[in-house]
Amino acid sequence: ADAAHGFIENTELRGIFGRGKPEVTIKHEQDGTYYRSRIDWLTDDNKIILDLKTTDGPAKPESFIRGPLRGLHYDMKAEFYKWMVACQFDTAPSFYWFVQETEAPYCCSLIGMAPSMVELGQRKLAIADGLWKKCMAERKWPAYGLEIAYAESEPWQETTLLQRELEELPQ
């Protein structure tokens, strides 16, 4: 917590932990569809959403952007949270990820979205919302199939193992 507070106090978001609340739950109903979100940190004026992410890897922005942000569709989640705050409080909040390493020295970074990533998140959210409404209306939920899926090795895995085997050969 000390590393997080020390980091934040040296950024443009300084003081944010003194003017907001943690774990804010927002519920919203629109045209018979119910939505719910739980926001890690929302400022008292509802203008900034801070989403805490911890990592056992580096908290470098490039690592977070290439990994979880894209892989876990955090851009869509950010746009969903912004939409929920906008519906509840009639404001257009900014959204930032606060990424912190779980090992000392607990390095941190702040990450926002460029307009191109915002647009991508909004488009993903529109698709997800449409699918949710369709599933709710039809009471059918898509799945991944009933067959057993078999994992194949990737070429890079084969190469890595071959290199290791060659290194282990007696000289």
Image: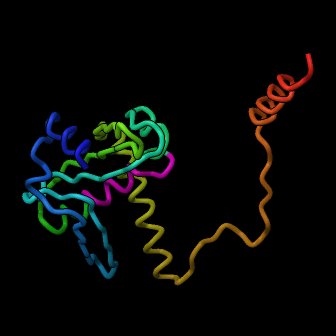
Quadrant holding the C terminus: top right
Q: Residue at x 41, y 42 (%)?
A: 103
Image position, residue 169 (x, y; %)? 90, 23
Q: Nearer the viewer, residue 38 or 117?
A: 38
Q: Nearer the viewer, residue 99 or 35?
A: 99
Image position, residue 39 (x, y; %)? 27, 62
Residue 54 vertical placement versus 57 (above, below): below
- Left or right, 13 with respect to 119, comes to left
Report which quarter residue 31 is drawn in: bottom left
Image position, residue 58 (x, y; %)? 44, 36
In magenta segment, residue 70: no
In magenta segment, residue 76: yes
Q: Nearer the viewer, residue 63 or 140?
A: 63
Residue 132 vertical placement versus 139 (above, below): above
Residue projecting furthest to the right: 170
Q: How many marks?
A: 0
- Left or right, 108 with respect to 145, comes to left
- Left or right, 164 with respect to 57, comes to right
Q: Which residues are magenta?
A: 71-82
- Left or right, 170 with respect to 69, comes to right
Q: Residue at x 21, y 54 (%)?
A: 49
Residue projecting furthest to the top: 171
Image position, residue 153 (x, y; %)? 79, 43
Q: Residue at x 25, y 57 (%)?
A: 82
Q: Residue at x 39, y 42 (%)?
A: 101
Magenta portion: prevailing SS class: helix
Image coloring type = rainbow
